Image: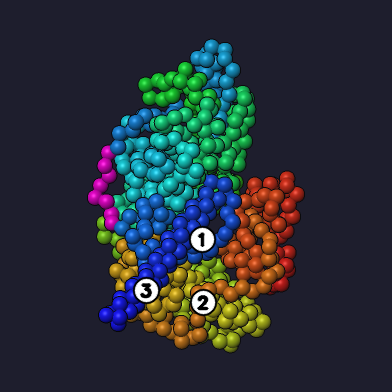
Amino acid sequence: MAISGLRGYIYKELLWGVLFIVGRPMKDVKKRIEELREEIRRHDYLYYVLNQPEISDREYDKLFAELKKLESEHPELIVPTSPTQRVSERPVEGFEPVQHAIPMLSIDNTYSEEELREFDRRVAKGLEGAEYSYTVELKIDGLAISLRYEEGILRQAATRGDGRTGDDVTANVRTIRAIPLELKNKESAPEVLEVRGEVYMSKKAFAELNEERMEAGEPTFANPRNAAAGSLKLLDARITATRKLAFFAYSLGQVSRQLAPTHYEAMQKLRDFGIPVNEHIRHCRTIEEVIEVCQGWAGKKERLAYPIDGMVIKVNRYDQQEILGYTGRAPRWCISYKFAPEQAETIVESIDVQVGKSGILTPVANLRPVPLAGTTVKRASLHNFDLLAKLDVRCGDTVVIEKAGEIIPQVVTVKHQQRNLFESRPFEVPKTCPACSRPVKKDENGVYIRCVNPHCPAQIRERLEHFAGKGQMDIEHLGPALIDQLVSRGLVKTYADIYRLRLDQLASLERMAAKSASNVLASIEESKRRPLWRLIAGLGIRNIGTQSAQILANEFGSLEALMEASVERLQQIEQIGPVVAQSVYDYFHNPENVRVLRELLAAGVCPTVEQVKQSDALAGKTIVVTGTLKHFTRQQIEQTIQAHGGKPSSSVSKKTSFVVAGDNAGSKLDKARQLGVEVIDEEEFLRRIGQRRQP
């Protein structure tokens, strides 16, 4: 009995011990998960709302990865508002209709100062002499969206549709990191808060997406607005998550209680809830102030990282908006001032056909140089031969060009009446590749014509240039002219051949002295230990850009592990959808690609995953970079700043230690000078971190 009692006592103590051991860590895990969620939300707020990031993307990703790991180990602790729950695991079958509680009406447009003054006279008349003022906002060129928050939680997102009924795109909108799933300070938010705004795509994200689509043999988007709209209407939210969409709020829909008496104040309140509002919103007392703001932006809109197509002017006080009311289709208290698209007229001097690294043949119009939107345009892509035939562009034609989304020069009109009918001939679609003379083939159910010869010298050149480029393996001194010679001589056919080059081979080339040849070999040797993501990005895998390459590198840690990954394993990675997963799998299961990769590794290419800290030269310093640099891409210089102990920042403030200014520096340089922040050039930056670049 005594032994039995002792056993019972020991059993009870062991049980309590087990409960203590198991229960205590669970409490700590729950606490850590909450801390991580709050920290990630805080950094989202700093980045998207205040434009004052405190940490790098890499540090952010580490926080996210830790949270994701803890939640996968403890799925019972996952909640819908967790930052990890942005991406739906399965595609939707279609979009359900959503009836807007308050219609999302369109806005009347105006195109001149006089029309703005006429609008002001109508407002004055409608308010019968009462004092009033305006807010002026940038008209973001994207897709209108409505976000419905209930008790501080995002419950529904809907497109504008016909103004009364839109589509439920909640699953896709949840992938946009700029949009909070849970409001900051939600205790002070109305029980129902409907926020309306614009989902848009930055100019950089648009350019990257079109490049990826062209490489994948898919039609490119005409402008960032179409790209944003198309991305938001995808049935698979995992693909939407890769499109780098962003958001700015510009008005309210249904609210259970008034936030503020004026529109300007209400937009500031939204910032307090963690919702992005464009920083360039202005409060103007008179219509002349409004016109001055509009004129100012017409001349500097190219500096923005995102596209705008005008300004939106609103009567500021909500009670006065109610007095003015609505017409059948638009509010009387609001008007849009549209910028006329900047166009230029020039002559098509010739039409070339370029061959890309995936074999796509692209017609390009060589133009008589003409200034347009801040640059001199000499060439305009005609995208594909179907578009070329539709426009009927011919050599010698007078054409009108404009920049699509302020980015890509394109031909919009051909002045056929000015054509010389006796000399003009339609451009013939190539039947063979202009580089290798092998037959070409049109994509099935597609618009692109491709050279299907994998040994085509033009494709080899393009692939090698991409591989050696700054954003990939960054092999200094190995530029297009040298690559052209290497390919023409048959010295380099694959990526691996680069690492087998000898001094005597290089020295035998034109304009290549022994010293120059040594510099090239030194750069090639240096590139052997580039980060893994750079190697992945350099391989030219369809649908894989810099961001996807970084995701894959962080997930697998080695090239060998990535090569062995199944399609199913790849699809499990957040932001890697089925199309991207299949592209990666196909690339690494192509025998020729595998052979080249094995040769790369055998030649001493040993990609790294973690960047080793190099010095404390920039310790404690916050650094902003603006303009175009000679020696770095934007990503490279941010990594270099971090490697030397500094903190890169995207916005200038009094806390900024110094600004590195390259060519064509914009508003950040102006702000630095206003605040008295030190400005240095790229060479001085290199000196401070103890590096020198050879000219």
In the rendered image, residue 407, in percent from the top left (x then y), is placed at 51, 49
Which residue is tagged 2?
Answer: 608
Q: Residue at position x 49%, y 68% from top? A: 466
Q: Which range is magenta?
A: 90-97
Q: Is residue 429 visible?
A: no
Give the class, few, some or many, for how many residues have Cα within 10 Å of label 2's Cα (few <14, many ≥20).
some
Which residue is tagged 3?
Answer: 13
Q: Is 562 situated above or below 191?
A: below
Q: Residue at position x 53%, y 24% from top? A: 317
Q: Quadrant of residue 98?
A: top left
Which residue is tagged 1?
Answer: 60
**Dominant secondary-structure state across the stretch colored magenta:** loop
Q: Label 1: state its secondary structure.
A: helix
Q: Which residue occupies the foreground of this view, 41 or 191?
A: 191
Tell me the distance, in whole angstroms, between the alpha carbons under discs 1 and 2. Answer: 20 Å
Mark 3: which amino acid? Answer: Glu
Give the class, few, some or many, for how many residues have Cα within 10 Å of label 1's Cα (few <14, many ≥20).
some
**Quarter of the image where the C terminus is located:** bottom right
Mark 2: which amino acid? Answer: Thr
On screen, residue 186 versus residue 6, left or right, reads right
Q: Tell me which label, 3 or 1, sits earlier in the chain.
A: 3
Q: Label 2: state its secondary structure.
A: loop
Q: Which residue occupies the foreground of this view, 187 or 361?
A: 187
Mark 3 in CB contact with mark 2 (< 8 angstroms)? no
Magenta segment includes 299:
no
Mark 1: which amino acid? Answer: Tyr
On screen, residue 625 versus residue 229, left or right, reads right
